[in-house]
Amino acid sequence: MKKLFVFLAVLFCATYSFAQMKWGIEAGANLSRFVGSASLPSEKKAKPSMQIGITVDYELSAHWMLMSGLSFVQRHGELGLGENYPSSALGYEAYMRFPKVQSKINYGQIPLKVGYNFRVSRNFDLLPSMGLYAAYGFGAGSCDMQIKNQGKTQWKPLDGMVENGLKAFRSWDWGATAGIKAIWKQHYVLSVDYSLGIKKVSPDYGLRNSTYQLSVGYRF
């Protein structure tokens, strides 16, 4: 009898926990760029890309939420990189060695955020949230690199090799994230998120990822 009671208690807790969990799927577009405190790169252009993933929202109380999930996020950036080189006539003259360097890196990303559910009306909820994210770059392929006086070539941002004097980016990325999610009729989702890397993804120039995301989705 005691074992049956324990089994029913565990089953009740598991069912109750599952009822508090909301699963969803979201997809959309993002605008990503690199930020850094160093004087180089001289240019850091934002580029559009995309993301898709599943979300998990766990209700801690009547309003507080613990929010996570797993997403495929593609970040696409463009840099202008330069170095100083000696000139026999003018001493040191600065010019662009890499006028244009592009990267398009695929990440698997997991956020962990705390949110609060504002019940605006019977059919409309707003969930602001903030927390941390961790991401791992698992693929990039070949990207364009423009070299001064040599034209365009290809480089692999995650290959771990030095190409034309430029080191590969680090695979791991983590940082802070915040956003707001609008839910219509408990199912239809529109979310806006911003993430800023704390870990530097470039060993050369102290670059960090900065990404704005806009997604639509469905919450089951």
Image (cartoon, rainbow, N blue to C red):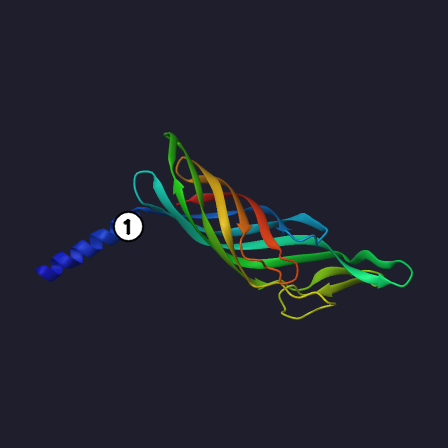
Nearest the viewer among 91 and 217 is: 91
Query: Where residue 68 appears, x then y in whole percent?
Result: 42, 51
Of all residues, the one furthest to the front in this rendering is 91
- Which of the 4 image quadrants contains residue 63? top left
Give the SS element for disc 1: helix
Nearest the viewer among 62 and 28 is: 62
In the displayed structure, 204 sits above or below 125; it is below
For the image, the number of numbered tags is: 1
Task: Give me the residue at 81% from left, 56% from top.
Answer: 94
| Mark 1 surroundings: few (<14), some (14-19) or many (≥20) residues within 10 A | few
Give the side of residue 16 with respect to residue 37, left or right. left
Task: Give me the residue at 31% from left, 46% from top.
Answer: 20
Query: Where residue 42 appears, x then y in whole percent?
Result: 73, 51
Nearest the viewer among 98 and 126 is: 98
Nearest the viewer among 14 and 155 is: 155
Of all residues, the one furthest to the top in this rendering is 121
Give the side of residue 25 with respect to residue 167, left or right. left
The quadrant of the picture occupied by the N terminus is bottom left
Of all residues, the one furthest to the left in this rendering is 1
Of all residues, the one furthest to the bottom in this rendering is 161
The quadrant of the picture occupied by the C terminus is top left
Camera sees residue 56: no
Task: Give me the residue at 72% from left, 50% from top.
Answer: 43
Q: Amino acid at mark 1?
A: Ser
Find disc 1 in the rendering and name its residue: 17
Query: Where residue 171 appears, x then y in whole percent?
Result: 56, 63
Camera sees residue 32: yes
Query: Where residue 64 appears, x then y in whole percent?
Result: 34, 41
- Which of the 4 image quadrants contains residue 184? top left
